[in-house]
Image (spheres, grey):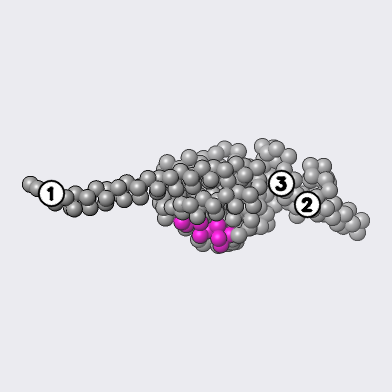
Amino acid sequence: MKINRWSFVFILFSFVLIYSGCSNKQKAIKQSQDTRRVAEAYMSKGDYSGALKYLLQAEATYGDDYLLHDDLGKVYVAKSKFDTAIKHFKKALELEPEFAPGKNNLGSAYLLDEKWDEAIAIFKELNENLLYATPHYPMYNLGWAYYNKHDYKTAIEYFNKALKIQHGFVMALRGLGLSYQKMGKHDLAIQYFEKATDKSPPFPQLYFDLGQAYHANHQFEQAIEAFEEVSRIKPDSEISDQAISEIKRIKKQSLK
């Protein structure tokens, strides 16, 4: 079969265009990925403004990288731009629907934006992923979402589920303490706050929570000791000032 000379030239030219297009796309992808890695180095140092500059460059070069959008989401979370972060986490999942860490990041952004029902939907979906490496985190996050919806009974269920998966999980222990405190069960709150302080490195917020629980349970000496620990761990800070105010309030009450 004879091939017309001009047909042959056209086929060859089309092939060159396709190859050239593929080559240019691969170059753009690599350039974008390299720029994203530079941004991630800035993120690791906590320089989110520097990271954002490079991430936006990477997006302009090639915008269909799910890891890029996940990084953009993290940077916008760090800048408290939760609506923008949510858009990028959604884009990451649109590009890679099975990206479980991205689902967790999206759910966490919903929590930070106080969109409790949206967060619950994401974390329940994530709980169904049997391959997710750290299932105690979505369990805890579900507990935190229900806690903020004032559904303390359900919150307690999920905090306990998180503890069954990861024994001694400090965040879940604190969640239980906060939930029981809201329910007026101060003895149980103290029990879980004490467990959390035993298993955690010095963490001022935990001791502040414990001091409040002691105070509510009329254990004033223990409350003062817990609040003093807050100031010892983090002196000259806002939470230390709050602890000192609580100590003054307790001492004033004891004089009446």
Q: Nearer the viewer, residue 6 or 23?
A: 6
In this view, the mark in front (2 or 3): 2
Residue shown at 84% from the left, 48% from the top: 236
In the rendered image, residue 240 lying in the magenta stretch gets the answer: no
- Label 3, secondary structure: give it: helix
In the rendered image, residue 91 lying in the magenta stretch gets the answer: yes
Residue shown at 48% from the left, 52% from the top: 61
Say left or right for 63 vs 255. left
Residue 205 image point, x, y percent:
72, 48
- Label 2, secondary structure: give it: helix
Which amino acid type is shown beneath numbered disc 1? Ile
In the figure, 27 relative to 106: above or below? above
Which amino acid type is shown beneath numbered disc 3? Leu
Cα separation, mark 2 vs mark 3, equals 11 Å
Q: Which residue is mark 3?
A: 206
Say left or right for 83 vs 212. left
Which residues, given as a range, are shown in magenta?
82-92
Cα separation, mark 2 vs mark 1, equals 83 Å
Cα separation, mark 3 vs mark 1, equals 81 Å
Q: Nearer the viewer, residue 194 or 24?
A: 24
Q: Which residue is mark 2?
A: 239
Dots 2, 3 in contact, CB < 8 A:
no
* Nearer-N-terminus badge (2/1): 1
Dots 3, 1 in contact, CB < 8 A:
no
Which numbered circle lies on residue 91?
none
Residue 116 image point, x, y percent:
55, 61
* Nearer-N-terminus badge (2/3): 3
